Amino acid sequence: MVVLAAAGAVYYYSQGKTAVKPTGEVVAELIGRKYNKPADAVTIDVGTDTGKFAKGSVRFADEMGGGLWFAAKTDKGWELAFDGNGIVLCDTANKYDFPQDMIP
C-alpha cells in the first residue's frame, strides 16, 4: 500500500501537481498541533465540505465527549476557524465569510 501511495505521489509530482490530503486529515493535523496531540489521536468527522468551507465534529482518543470544528480554505491552505463547544461568534464567521447556512 505504501508503494502505491509513493507511486501516486510521484505521478502527481511528474504531472506538475501535488498530492492533496483529504480535509479530515488536514483538520486533524491542525487540531492536533493546537492541542499538542498526535494527529492519529484526533478523530475527525467531516459533516460538510464545500471545498472552501468545512465543518464537522472532533474527539480526542483519550477523552470522553467531543466538540465541533469549522475550517476555511484560504490562500495559505486550510485554516481552523473554530473548534470546541458553544456558538461560533459572528466575528469568526465573518472573518472567513462562511455561508450563513453553514454556521448557526
Image (spheres, helix red, strand yellow):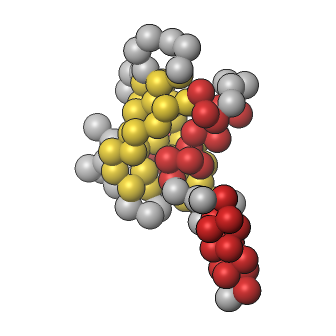
Can I make out residue 75 in this image?
Answer: no
**Residue at x-position 34% and y-position 50%:** 48
**Residue at x-position 66% and y-position 59%:** 2
* Label total for image: 0
Snapshot quadrant of residue 86: top left
**Residue at x-position 39% and y-position 45%:** 46
Observer-nearest of 90 and 27 = 27
- Residue 53, relative to residue 57: is it above or below? below
- Residue 60, relative to residue 103: is it above or below? above
Observer-nearest of 14 and 51 = 14
Q: Position of residue 63 (x, y in %)?
A: 51, 12
In the rendered image, the quadrant that contains the C terminus is top left
Observer-nearest of 2 and 62 = 2
Q: Position of residue 10 (x, y in %)?
A: 72, 77
In the rendered image, the quadrant that contains the N terminus is bottom right
Snapshot quadrant of residue 13: bottom right
Can I make out residue 101 in this image?
Answer: yes
Q: Position of residue 66 (x, y in %)?
A: 43, 20
Observer-nearest of 80 and 24 = 24
- Residue 74, relative to residue 33: is it above or below? below
**Residue at x-position 38% and y-position 26%:** 87
Q: Position of residue 23 (x, y in %)?
A: 51, 53
Identify the residue at the far bottom of this view: 15
